Image: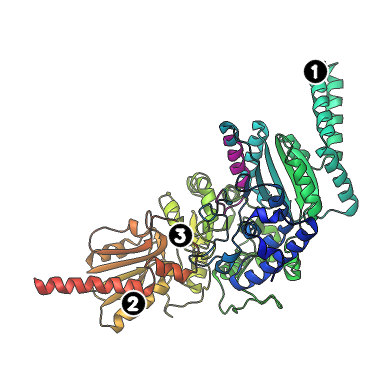
Amino acid sequence: MKKYLDKIKSPADLKKIRPPGLVSLCGEIRLFLVETVAKTGGHLASNLGVVELTVALHYVFNTPKDKIVWDVGHQAYIHKLLTGRKGKFRSLRQLGGMSGFPKPNESPHDCFATGHSSTSISAALGFAVSRDLAGDDYSVIAVIGDGSMTGGLAYEAMNNAGRQGSDLLVILNDNQMSISENVGALSKHLSDMRIAPSYIGVKKSVRGMLEKMPVIGGGIERFIERAKDGIKYMLVPGVLFEELGFNYVGPVDGHDLEQLIAVLGKVRRMSGPVLLHVYTTKGKGYDRAETAPAKYHGVDSFNIETGNPLETKVWDTYSDVLGKAMQQLAEKNDKIVAVTAAMPDGTGLAEFASRYPERFFDVGIAESHAVTFSAAMAKNGFIPVVAIYSTFLQRSYDQILHDVCTQNLHVIFAIDRAGVSGPDGETHQGVFDISFLAHIPNITIMAPVNKREFIEMLDFAAGMNSPVAIRFPRGSASRVIRDEFSPIELGRAQVIGDGNKEGVAIVALGSMMEVGFEVYTRLLDNGYNATLINPRFIKPIDADMANSLREHRLSVVLEDNAEIGGFASMLPREGKLLRFAFPDEFIEHGERWELLRKYGMDAESVYERIERFFAALRMTDSNG
């Protein structure tokens, strides 16, 4: 039994606890988080780092009237705990269960759906401006991490917010800055001074006097400006934010609950845009996560004592294969470079970065910049391999079209987590990349069915001289469909099992080959005539393969993309065609196999539809 946590059904219950009890509550929350995420998997280190900050926010502010926008949202587990969802944590990230990200349809305390980085300040400003237009009175808070501040959207929003002048609080959760005791003491003094109403009044008065002062010669004016700037840069840690129009407060210890509550109570009464700089320790309270926060950022279920996953990884993942293949490519070709957007570990490139540091570029959470940066490198004769998750590549659509494909530049896009990526849900499912890439001229798009084919595709792409995208799923890359392997040729499919035209042709794209092969085998076992095709190329499509589908009695296309704009939409319409793809809706969180079954794309569902087709055909033939 948790003395405090079990009693909290809403933030109102939190406010009944006296400060010493709040410290105990934070300990209970950390224990609950570790115990829960060890069973369900999820984002651990980021949540452990914001326990005190979240408790302080809900202690001072009043949601859902006050709006808290969590950037990305993977650190909102404590927010969910304090807003009445403790009982749902056993279903965290499971099909039909609680999302790992804020969702307004889950709770009125989740004011805005998030999942991608650097959006919180834009959203919070939208709330603040519309609040002012409506004549309402409530606080708006954006909580953003230092990693998210590498995204340009955050600065676009801050620039607009500083010019707009609406009351808005941005909390910068800095979990990487190390501040010494002396600097910390000075920062606390500056924070206290800057919050004080007397300081704010003096600052306004001085600013007003300076604006009214006549200019006594250009030299004196320039001297005064340089002096002012010099003093600011010496004394004000947040001068960048001040220049953007924000009142800067901090840094503040994000684990000192008493100080946090006091500071939040004061900044709540400040007018205009305010930035509160809070420093925290990612993974705090669980030693393994504190020591290796990147490893415990997003985890599968694990043993708390050892920190090891409960399920041992047997096969290489596609990300692992990418990292190893990239090293081999770089060894053969000194023009190969790797680019990622704050995902060296997730994309498997950490070892490449260690071996080839001068040829590895982590640009931060800035996917659009990553693509244009790579385009210019390609223009200068290099071959950038841009490794980005499918869901995040969406953020760089214009740069792919305008900067890479319009100029027909040799940039290789390694699109990780293509298809359903599982428990992270709607904002992370990679089911749109075919739809937003295939219509762009000059680009070649491929999808491997296994580890060997993926390596061959990377090598093939490196030998091209135009834009290439290779989409591959999350998870194992070692499911070999067949030992025979034909060389890759541009725009040529591979026929794995060749039946006659009176039967069914199964076209299984990329990771859907696992389902396709199971259906194909079952059809043969039950006396059906079947052909199994690995398209390899989404674009250009194999014209011979496409034409052959017209001649089969039934063609079945399996793809892990949205149906609209997907692979099957580019195939000929003549003949009977069954399409298995995701419908026109956002795909919720759940394990891959669960989602395939839910949407009728698992082997059992596909086989049953094929059987129903032939049963209806036999009935028609007998009646005729």
Q: Real-space Cα distance between discs 3 and 1? A: 59 Å
Q: Real-space Cα distance between discs 2 and 1? A: 83 Å
Is 173 colored magenta in this rendering?
A: no
Look at the picture and state if 34 lies above or below 409: below
Direction from residue 583 to residue 301 in the image, left or right: right
Q: Identify residue for label 1.
A: 212
Q: Give the extent of the magenta segment.
A: 112-130
Depth check, front residue: 75 or 387: 75
Tell me residue 14's x, y (percent). 69, 56
Q: Nearer the viewer, mark 2 or mark 3?
A: 3
Residue at the image position 25 percent from the left and 82 percent from the top: 527
Q: Identify residue for label 3.
A: 587
Badge 1 density bin: few <14, some 14–19, many ≥20, Cα 10 Å: few
Q: Residue furthest right?
A: 182
Badge 2 density bin: few <14, some 14–19, many ≥20, Cα 10 Å: many
Task: Using the rendered image of the protein, determine whether residue 454 is visible from the camera's viewpoint.
Answer: yes
Tell me residue 556's x, y (percent). 31, 67
Q: What quarter of the picture does the N terminus occupy? A: bottom right
Look at the picture and state if 204 lies above or below 180: above
Direction from residue 21 to residue 84 in the image, left or right: left
Evaluate if marks 2 and 3 touch, with contact meaning CB atoms under 8 Å apart. Answer: no
Look at the picture and state if 284 lies above or below 259: below
Give SS at disc 2.
helix
